[in-house]
Amino acid sequence: MRERMITQLPVGCGTAIRAVSRMSGRLVALALLAGLLSSCVGPPSGELVRVQRPDGSRQCREGGASPAAMGARLEDAGIEVYCREKARDGRPRVAMCGAASGRINVYSISAGDLARARELGFEPLPETADGLERCVDVGD
């Protein structure tokens, strides 16, 4: 249960909390934890949006860009990525070898960076998206 609570905290806090929880002396740990939590902040705008881009994979073939590799384009443009995951776009498509697979890479970014992400070819996550995997925290 503690792990679940840690994953719901702002990015960058999980590692700090795990380190403090291993310390001896509950009072010291509690004081340090309070200080660490007060310094953990989310995105500057306070709101995250999810953007996506097709990974380029094709049916009947291995491949497609990984979320980490594609996310580097956002980071190189100065856009902080708070988490990344793999999903499906949820759109119907023909079942045919060589056709697009519908797999997408999804990123959580600050709402203030949406326009720059769109310039790089990323689009807001469609409502039809499904199969979202567990979000991978890219903080720390």
Image (cartoon, helix red, strand yellow):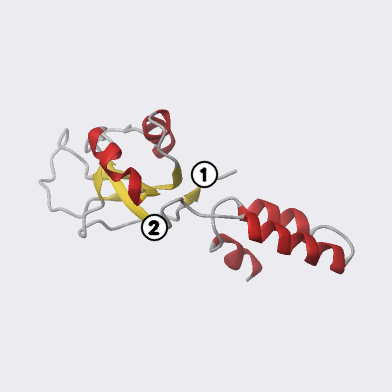
Q: Is residue 32 left or right of residue 101?
A: right
Residue type pointed to by label 2: Glu
Q: Residue at x 20, y 59 (%)?
A: 128
The dot on residue 91 is none
- Can residue 54 be seen in this snapshot? no
Q: Residue at x 58, y 66 (%)?
A: 4
97 up-or-down from 82: above or below: above
Q: Please provide percent x and percent y for residue 38.
A: 65, 60
Quarter occupied by residue 46? bottom left
The image position of residue 138, as x and y in percent, is 51, 44
Relative side of 5 to 24, left or right = left
Depth-wise, is mark 2 or mark 1 nearer the camera? 2
Q: What SS does tag 2 mark?
A: loop
Which amino acid type is shown beneath numbered disc 1? Val
At 34% from the left and 47% from the top, the residue drawn is 112
Residue 47 - label: 2
- For marks 2 and 1, give the CA distance: 17 Å
Work out whether mark 2 precedes mark 1 in sequence or the reverse, and give the earlier one: 2
Residue 120 in percent (x, y) is at: 26, 32
Kind of element beneath mark 1: loop
Instruction: Give the label on residue 138, or none.
Output: 1
Image quarter (top left, top right, bottom left or bottom right) of the C terminus: top right
**Dot 2: within a 10 Å radius of its alpha carbon, few (fewer than 14), some, or many (20 or more) residues?**
few
**Residue 119 in view (yes/no):** yes
Q: Residue at x 31, y 33 (%)?
A: 64
